Amino acid sequence: MNTLRNVDLIIEARWIIPVEPANTTLEHHAVVIDKGLIADLLPIHKSHECYTATEIVELPEHVLLPGLINAHTHAAMSLLRGIADDLPLTPWLQDAIWPMEQKLVSSQFVYDGTSLAAAEMLCGGITCASDMYFFPDDAARAFSDAGMRAALGITIIDFPSNYATTADDYLHKGLQARENWKENPLINFALAPHAPYTVSNQSFERIATLAEELDTGIHIHIHETTQEIRGSLAQHGVRPLARLDGLGLIGPNSQLVHAVYLTECEQQLIAARNCSVIHNPTSNMKLASGIAPVNSMLAQGINVALGTDGAASNNRLDIFQEMRHAALLAKVTSGDASALPAHQVIRMATLNGAQSLGLQEQIGSIQHGKEADLCAVSLGSPQNTPCYDPASHLVYVAGRESVTDVWVQGKPRVRTGSLLHASNKELLSISRLWQNATKR
Amino acid sequence: MNTLRNVDLIIEARWIIPVEPANTTLEHHAVVIDKGLIADLLPIHKSHECYTATEIVELPEHVLLPGLINAHTHAAMSLLRGIADDLPLTPWLQDAIWPMEQKLVSSQFVYDGTSLAAAEMLCGGITCASDMYFFPDDAARAFSDAGMRAALGITIIDFPSNYATTADDYLHKGLQARENWKENPLINFALAPHAPYTVSNQSFERIATLAEELDTGIHIHIHETTQEIRGSLAQHGVRPLARLDGLGLIGPNSQLVHAVYLTECEQQLIAARNCSVIHNPTSNMKLASGIAPVNSMLAQGINVALGTDGAASNNRLDIFQEMRHAALLAKVTSGDASALPAHQVIRMATLNGAQSLGLQEQIGSIQHGKEADLCAVSLGSPQNTPCYDPASHLVYVAGRESVTDVWVQGKPRVRTGSLLHASNKELLSISRLWQNATKR
């Protein structure tokens, strides 16, 4: 007689998309989870022969996939969701967003806004976010309280804000926050110089040195608009990417956010340096920035991940929407309906996101030994049926409204569509409070 | 003492977007409905002074707007939702869709598929659809049974199908269906020659004459792909629009579906002839057809409405998604983030749709004397808050998952998110049946 191994949790699903191996949809498989880690992935009937579990979750009409990774956001800006829509970029920033941030941004604003964003993301199947904003210590606290994984950007910008005064001050406070959270396995930090047009060469050089010393990522907005590139040519005589490469910032830890405008040569450079690009298709459309050359970047072998950007320029923190928009834009810009197929875009939203954050050994796929960050999507409602291919259904049919269950490190965060750690009432009182504050 | 007028229904909403007058969001207003018609629109407190009602519906955190109009779909293709995704257009049609249609399409397939589609559309706030498919009599029956408004296309195509053999046969059967439904106020018919490349000059001439005699719309796919235009130049020596104009098909009743490729002159012609264009942004992206010049068409004064196309090429029958995609594409293609603002795109999804179908006197706005086709969207969930502008929230934040209540002619079809006329169980058994049939 076999001895059954007892584990914490078994999730039995109609379909599982493990992401690695690529282009695979398993049917009637089970993920076995113990101590927060994925212990096995095998057919359901075999799991009964090998394991018993403290808890068994049955998902008879669901796809189970790795938790989605939002590789670029400004989480606390959820409190400014849609505050200045349908405006051109410059008045949007200068007349609406910046004055409002000057009026409101504080430690409490960041904790509250990040809490609201974390709730929205978890409910939409996102288990990890890469965040760039002010007061990263408070953002980390909000993500930690929500039980969500996060990479916090240590924002560095050569302009004073309610948070810090000089580039040195930003860096000092950010490094202190990093120190505060170093024992928390869910919370990571990266250096986040805001953009080429807001950070000096001197600051960039310091960041390059520090990133090497601390072995952290470098998260930066780059080549988002033609205006940015024209400005750099006028001021520095080179395009932003070339300037940053000269300063030592373009390497395997670099997370190049937006990268809408890239020449062939620049793509070759990014590929050669093993950088990641974070594609934010919805924000790039809504702010009329442009459409990033994703097909071409993928063909060059560049690791392309997906981000939502902040809720003031999107206005949903919804990686299902970003998957759909990435796939649709790749098709229409190439004139090829087979461009960026479903499995590939799911990989961008999971394993590529993990790789961009240097977390590819821990998360991003359903494989033995990885942490159990998982998301379940029901395809059982009439508008999700019939279903001929669960992978393409995730991209073109189902949305975040079909997410039912979410786990981080094997711990449930969303069950049957309900967030476990906070009530709608609490979240609504947060957004009401800050909406009122905008009017004062 | 005032005498209160007794009416059937009063809907009291936090916000109302009546669409006409344009760019208007009313707060704390009530729509008064009697005998299926909109009898009044006034502040809630005044409604209490003037009316009593058999039923009062309170929508304290909702936007009430006209029912959305899906101005182009192939409803029964919901049964082929996602059956052949990520394929180039020609193999998609020739190797997947057409053989499957040959295998399956029947009177029952169309009734069942249209029923599934009608349920999906009603739950997503769509109260009227313009449909082009086979067996229009059965499609009409499905829409009627669902209590939804529809304009049925009398499809005419010079190819035999399971439904009809010759152009004459299609026309004859379609006109018979029109006759069968002439007493039903929710069911309209239009002549629907499939496309320039599938209908002969002789058939087009007959259609032009008939459309004038019967005063019906002409609904046609046109200028969807560059291939279509090249084919027309090779075969007829002119582009499809010029050919159809020569045959008398381009007039105020014409509904030009897709219109992705249009020269400046062609847009001027369409504007001068008072045609409508039906923009299907998601389908045009997914099939890699291209991006229609919507900003330029609107600037020319062309009436542009929105359509989902069929579920095999979208794969959601979701006008909220089409609004979002229309707005985002208009911005990114123009480089202007203020292009196609929220109120304008909501108008495209409502009043412009009504006008394309010749129903602008009956539906498409919340105005005295119009029929009470209405849709309520809750903005009360955490991911829909804060809300600074309900109009832009409808386009960029909320989706069909936030639709709670839908009325057609003042009759409730969806209440607090639940479809009233059919159960999920019934709908799922339909899709299961036909999914199994694809495998036989």
Image (cartoon, coloured by chain):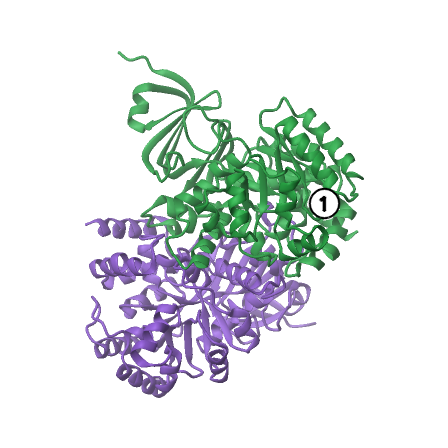
Chain colours: A green, B purple
- Measured as percent of width and height from the top left, residue B433 is found at 25, 50
Please state the total of marks drawn on the protein image.
1
Per the image, label 1 sits on a secondary structure element best described as: helix
- Measured as percent of width and height from the top left, residue B259 is found at 43, 71
Residue at x-position 51% and y-position 75%: B303
Is residue A426 something that shows in the picture? no
Query: In the image, is A338 to the left or to the right of B326?
Result: left
Q: Is residue A438 above or below residue A192?
A: below
Residue at x-position 29% and y-position 27%: A45
- Relative to the observer, which residue lies in front, B85 or B353? B85
Query: In the image, is A310 to the left or to the right of A107?
Result: left
- Relative to the observer, which residue lies in front, A339 or A439? A339
Chain containing the residue with disc 1: A
Is residue A277 something that shows in the picture? yes
- Measured as percent of width and height from the top left, residue A97 is found at 71, 52
Q: Is residue B383 above or below residue A14?
A: below
Q: Quadrant of the N terminus of chain A?
A: top left
- Inspect the image, locate mark 1, and give the three-letter code of the amino acid beneath it: Leu
Q: Which residue is mark 1?
A: A433
- Measured as percent of width and height from the top left, residue B169 is found at 21, 77
Query: In the image, is A378 to the left or to the right of B363?
Result: left
Q: Mark 1 packing: few (<14 Cα in 10 Å), some, or many (20+)?
A: few
Q: Is residue A434 above or below residue B364?
A: above
- Relative to the observer, which residue lies in front, A159 or B142? A159
Quadrant of res B103? bottom left
Query: In the image, is A377 to the left or to the right of A98?
Result: left
